[in-house]
Every structure is written in C-alpha cells, then in structure tokens.
Image (tube, coloured by chain):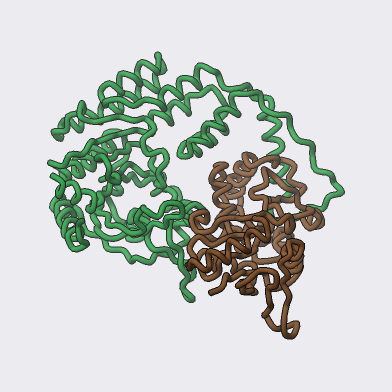
Chain colours: A brown, B green
Amino acid sequence: MTIKLGIPSKGRLMADTFDWFGARGVTITRTGTDREYAGRVDGAEGVELVLLAAGEIPRELAAGRIHLGVTGSDVVQEKIARWETKIAPLAALGFGHADLVLAVPKTWTDVRDLSDLDAVADAFRRAHGFRLRIATKYHRLVRAHLKAAGVTSYQLVDSQGATEGTVANLTAEAIADITSTGATLDANHLKVIGDVMHKSQATLFQSLTADLSSKDEELLADLRSKIRV
Amino acid sequence: MTVKSDIRAEADRLRAAFEARGAETFEPQILQPAGALLNLYGEEIRARAFVTQDPLRGEMMLRPDFTVPLVQAHIINDRAEARYTYAGEIFRRQEDDDTRPTEYMQVGFEIIGHAPGAQAEIAADAEVFATIADALNGLPVTGTIGDFNVLTTAILGLDTPRRRKDALLRHLWRPTRFKALLDRFSRPAPPVPANADLNIPHVGLRSPVEIETRLALLAEEAKTPPLKTAEVDRLMALMAIRSTAPAAVDDIKRIASGDEDIVDAARGVEALLDALAAQSIDPASLNFEASYGLTALEYYTGFVFGFSAPNLPTVATGGRYDLLTATLSGGRLIPAVGGVIRPDAALALKVAA
C-alpha cells in the first residue's frame, strides 16, 4: 500500500512545494517528459505522488482519494462545506500567501466600511432596478462574510479570472478576490474595504476520510516525522 | 420512525381539512424560475435553496416554499380574495448542519387579497391562526404569537429622520445588524469623508452623481443628533417582551408610557386576542414574543405565529406578508396572511401520544 500525496501540477506553487519537502529531506522530482504528469518521491518510503490542479485537491482530500495534499486554505474553505470534519490542516507552508478581500472603486469615497456598502447597495438597487453585483469565484466565503456583516442588497456574479477588470467592464460594481500585494487592485482603480475575509497560504492537509491500513499508518507516521509535522 | 406514505397521508388529510374550510388547492411546479426568488430574498437564498441550470430556461430553483409561486399565480390570474391550500415537498439546502433535512413536506392555508383595513386584517389573521390550531387540535403543542406592528410603530415613532427609521426597518429581520445600526445612530455621526481626488479615474456603473448624493446625505447625517437613550431603551424593552399573551399586552402598554401610537399597537394585539377568543382560543394559553419570527427567511410584516413541541422542528408557522405581495406585484397592496404545517412533525406527535 502507499500514501497518496497530492501536489499542484504546475507553476510556482508546485516548485515551492517541492522545495519545502526537499528542505526536509524528502525529494520530489518530475519524471518522464516535461509534459508528463508523473513523478517520484525519495527519502520517505511508500509515498506516491499525484499531480493535480490545485483547485481539485480539496475535493480529492474530502473524498478520501488522496491521503495528503498541498493547496491554498482559501480553496479548501470555499469548496468544502464543513471542511473541518473531512480535512485537517497539518502545516502552513509559509508561501502562497494571499488575502481574500472586498474591493470597490477608489472614487467611492462615501464607502469606508461594510455598513456603508450595505447602504450603497440598497440605494443602488432602487436607482438601477437590480442588486449591486460583486464579481468573485469565492461564493461561499463571500456570502458568509457579508451575511455576518448584515449586507443584503447585493448579488454575486461568477468570475473565474481577470476579476479586477469586471468593474471597468461594467459587469460588476465591486469585486471579491485574493490579493498578495494589492498592485492589481491599484492598477484597476480599486480599494479594499472591510476586514480581510480570509488569510490564505499554501497548507499541507490530511484527509480524514481516506482509508488507512495499519501499514499505511506506519508509512504516514514515518513521512510526518521526516517532514516534522 | 414514520414512513413517507404515512406523512403523505397526513398531509392529504390536513389539506382536505383546509379544503373543507373553503380553500382551493394549488399545485405549483417543483422547479421554479430563480429570478423572482433571487429578487425577493437576495443572495442569501442561494445558501438556502438548491439552484440548478436549465439550458433553455436559465437558472431554476427547487421550490424553497409555496408562498412565492402562489402569490405569483394569484397576481397573474388577477384574482380577488381567495383561500388556498397546498401540500407537497419543499427543498432547503443545508450548508452547515447535515442533520437537518433537505426536503420535507409542507401543508399550507393562505388567504390572499382580502379587504384592506385593520378590522379585515384581524379577522383574516384570526381565521388563519384558528384554522391551523384546529388542524393541530389534540396535539401537545404550544402556540406563540408576535406582531411586528408593535416594533415598527416604536421605530417610526423615534425622534430621528425618516432615512434612519427606514434603515432600521429594513434590518429589523437581522438582529445583529439591527443592533449595530441602533448603536451607530446612538452616537454622534462620524465626520464626512473628503471628496474624491479628481486625478483618480472613475470606473464602474455607479455614477459620480450617486456618490455625490450619498456624500451630501452623510453630511446631513453628521449634523443629525444621536437617538435619545430613553427611546432606544424603550425599543429594546419592547423587543425583549416574552410573556403570556394577555400579560404581554399589559407590558406593551406599560413600556409605551403614554406614547399613543404604541398604546394603539397594544390595542391591536388586544383586538386580535379578542378575535381569537371568539374562535374558542384562550388567549392565556398563548405566548407572545415581540421578536418572534425575526430570524425567519420570510418577509413577515404584522401578525406572526408558530406552534412548537419539545425536541421537534417547529410544527407550524405563519404570519402576515403584505410586503411580499407588494414586492411581487410591483407595489400594489394585496393583504395576505397564511401558515404552514409540517405533517412529519404533526405525525410524530400523534405517534408519540
């Protein structure tokens, strides 16, 4: 039997994850051609590498199809209802930092906090005949945040990318997205209002639903002691 | 454990009882267009209802209640006063609690489009309450009533501009937000933000004129004196009333301390209790909670009620929803009141008895 370790299949997140494991004596390498999604794990016994899109790792962990996985805490909380009953965080990896924030045009000087946003949303609905649109891909997190703050007359519109551009394109009045430096918000003439909804970073998670034989438990304990989590 | 066919039989029995009281049966589709529900309830409904997609019809929802399609049908068919009943499944998405059911049966009794005015309202409120109470006759349930009119009267009576009253009324359904607004209006208003830097490009559909209009409003707000402590205390005391119904009427009158509008609201509750007594319901057997129904999804506006039993979901709930009919009809006054029974809960009580 083996422990299945899910890791993002491309980009900075993959490279940083490889480095993080490497620094703890567990070497992960891609095998085959550049385009082949295959790899090997050295330095820990019985660990099988599974390369996946970062956004699919939460689902695979929750379903128990992988034992361990690295992804952003934001996608886990967004995609998995009651995630803490299915997935446990083992270690924050110290990279991939991003804050989920709500942003409105900088010229909205009358909007300083969510209470203002609520008043503006109500007036907007009366003036325009539809609810103020907030573009995001983080539907659950944003809805929960706005519900807790009592903001009501809004609607979420789905945006899977280039979200900061939706305001200028007149397809949304405000956005909720992750930001690390704020440069993209600034370039699109937007400012952050309210608290950070979620502080995300790359995190190593363990599935609470995956089957583990007694041999698997040993393998997992061995890996965890090597990477000190 | 009750089986589904038993629950369905109980639902049919209840519906037949409502038909015997002059209600016609309404049978809407399970799949409803999402637009009207989203417009009415906002984004929050997405967390509470199942949304699905039809390639031709767009977004659809598994009906989260019967009232919205019923009111829509009443309006489209241009009906006068009518009594309706229905029995069937409703669907509720549960994001946080997997012990709560995602589908269950409801049986309803509703009066839509009755004559306007306080007298007719009280008669219809009492008829709905008595009809539901009668259907639950013999079951060990406790009835609780409330009346939003008491709280809205106290809010409208505050010595503060209408825009603040409207903000409070709009958030009466969200206790945390309501309290935050009350706190904000009880302190001196913050200073007005500066006008926008003209070098920053404006983006988006919300126009500079809309921003200026609101800045002017904030300037007025900054000059508005805080709410009077005595008035806020009175409102909080009214919201906290939980008592037997006749005692609650006395409490409202005492807290009103001479405010004629609030005393009138108390008389409205008293008149309702008299109307219930005329239907053989003892007012002393009912609880009154001024904040009853404040956390519900529904848009109740006046009389509200529920019947509950220990360790069961609320067996029956209902109330007046003139604001919902006004919203769905583009602002017309269509007085409406109704209630629903959960036949599974009613049956569980019967089995236990």
Q: Quadrant of the C terminus of chain B?
A: top left
Q: Is residue B122 left or right of residue B58?
A: left
Residue shown at the point (22%, 62%) measured from the top left: B4
Residue shown at the point (68%, 76%) measured from the top left: A40
Front-most of residues B98 and B16: B98
| Quarter assignment of residue B94 | bottom left
Give the image location of residue B261, x and y in percent.
Answer: 40, 22
Residue B177 visible here: yes
Is B247 above or below relative to B42? Answer: above
Direction right: furthest residue: B199
Give the image location of residue B239, x and y in percent.
Answer: 41, 27
Residue A130 visible here: no
Direction bottom: furthest residue: A33
| Quarter assignment of residue A50 | bottom right
Is A152 above or below relative to B233? Answer: below
Residue shown at the point (50%, 39%) measured from the top left: B170
Give the image location of residue B327, x and y in percent.
Answer: 44, 49
Front-most of residues B5 and B243: B5
Disc tally is 0
Q: Is residue B350 left or right of residue A10?
A: left
Is B245 above or below relative to A92? Answer: above
Q: Is residue B310 left or right of residue B40?
A: left
Residue shown at the point (50%, 16%) measured from the top left: B230
Front-most of residues B180 and A92: A92
| Quarter assignment of residue B116 | top left
Q: Quadrant of the N terminus of chain B?
A: bottom left
Give the image location of residue A122, x and y in percent.
Answer: 58, 45
Q: Is residue A19 left or right of residue B291?
A: right
Front-most of residues B120 and A134: A134
